[in-house]
Image (tube, rainbow, N blue to C red):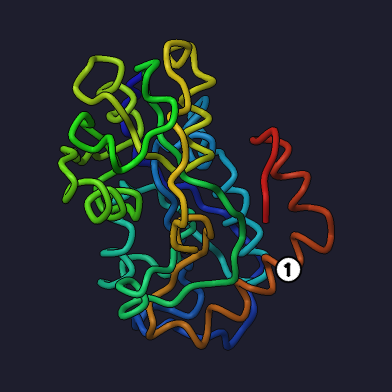
């Protein structure tokens, strides 16, 4: 299940309009706007036959068209995405991020561009409905730095669960298949990708958390607060245009059997 993390840069070139803003980076007005996606994260962004593909990649290209600037789509590890916004290495992150109160202190977020319900994955038949009361029996894997990890740390660890952090979804999948953990808490869409994989045949859904905060179901696009005024308007226009034109539904069908927005 483990795939190498391939960091590549794909230039998605769009029409250039004179006098466009500089995003506060001191760069040339014609320099590409850097959009980060999460690397090696099927079905959202991954490399196939040497080319970057995935739902978030296609959404990023639609944003480029709306911005009318040259854009560079850069795959990065999940842990690099928000720090890249803070340092100015990237201007936009398209990676299904939730808008938690802690994140809102430094970052601004778009309208919702999809919804995905988080759930547990397990290979233990008795764990088909995981609850906090079962916490002492659980060793739970979640992605490092994710809201899913934060939720397990807040809700399950104080009740006795051991919560382990993993860099990628491939690492998490390996962990449950090798017995390092007996449950995963995952974002819904990549979680279903794990279950549909050949290795996922021994796995099953272990239930859902009740009363999750909205930020765990609402996926948004992130920018640094200093660029919010310039960027959020065009980003939200791109999301709206995708949905109203029917292009969003066509994109979603390429990668998902269902998708809620």
Foreground pick, 139 / 191 = 139
Q: Is residue 160 above or below residue 222?
A: above
Quadrant in which residue 253 is drawn: top right
Foreground pick, 67 / 182 = 182
214 relative position to 133: left or right: right
Q: Is residue 194 above or below residue 110?
A: above
The quadrant in which the N terminus is found is top left
Foreground pick, 28 / 252 = 252
Q: Is residue 179 above or below residue 120?
A: above
Quadrant in which residue 103 is drawn: bottom left
Residue 203 placed where, x, y %? Answer: 43, 17
Q: Residue furthest front?
A: 133
- Residue at point 35%, 74% (across, down): 101
Q: Which residue is mark 1?
A: 240
Secondary element under disc 1, as helix, strand or loop, is helix
Label tally: 1
Q: Is residue 197 above or below residue 64?
A: above
159 relative position to 188: left or right: left
Dot 1: within a 10 Å radius of its alpha carbon, few (fewer than 14), some, or many (20 or more) residues? Answer: some
Residue 233 placed where, x, y %? Answer: 61, 81
Residue 8 placed where, x, y %? Answer: 39, 42
- Residue at point 71%, 45% (across, down): 251
Foreground pick, 198 / 222 = 198
- Residue at point 56%, 65% (across, down): 70
- Residue at point 27%, 24% (across, down): 182
The quadrant in which the C terminus is found is bottom right
Residue 107 placed where, x, y %? Answer: 37, 75
């Amino acid at each position: 299940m483990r795939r190498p993390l391939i960091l590549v840069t794909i230039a998605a070139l769009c029409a250039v309009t004179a006098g466009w803003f500089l995003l506060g980076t001191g760069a040339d007005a014609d320099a590409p706007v850097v959009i980060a996606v999460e690397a090696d994260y099927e079905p959202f962004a991954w490399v196939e036959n040497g080319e970057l593909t995935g739902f978030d990649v296609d959404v990023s290209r639609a944003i480029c068209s709306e911005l009318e600037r040259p854009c560079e789509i850069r795959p990065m590890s999940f842990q690099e995405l928000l720090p890249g916004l803070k340092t100015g290495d990237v201007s936009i992150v398209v990676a299904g991020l939730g808008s938690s109160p802690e994140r809102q202190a430094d970052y601004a977020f778009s309208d919702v561009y999809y919804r995905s319900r988080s759930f547990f994955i397990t290979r233990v038949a008795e764990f088909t409905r995981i609850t906090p009361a079962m916490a002492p029996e659980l060793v739970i894997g979640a992605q490092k730095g994710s809201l899913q990890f934060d939720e397990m740390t807040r809700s399950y660890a104080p009740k006795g669960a051991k919560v382990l952090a993993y860099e990628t979804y491939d690492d998490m999948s390996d962990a449950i298949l090798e017995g390092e953990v007996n449950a995963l808490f995952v974002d819904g869409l990549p979680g279903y990708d794990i279950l549909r994989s050949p290795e996922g045949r021994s796995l099953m859904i272990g239930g859902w958390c009740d009363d999750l905060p909205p930020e765990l179901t609402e996926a948004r696009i992130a920018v640094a607060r200093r660029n919010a005024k310039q960027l959020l308007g065009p980003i939200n226009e791109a999301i709206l245009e995708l949905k109203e034109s029917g292009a969003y539904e066509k994109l979603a069908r390429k990668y998902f059997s269902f998708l809620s927005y």
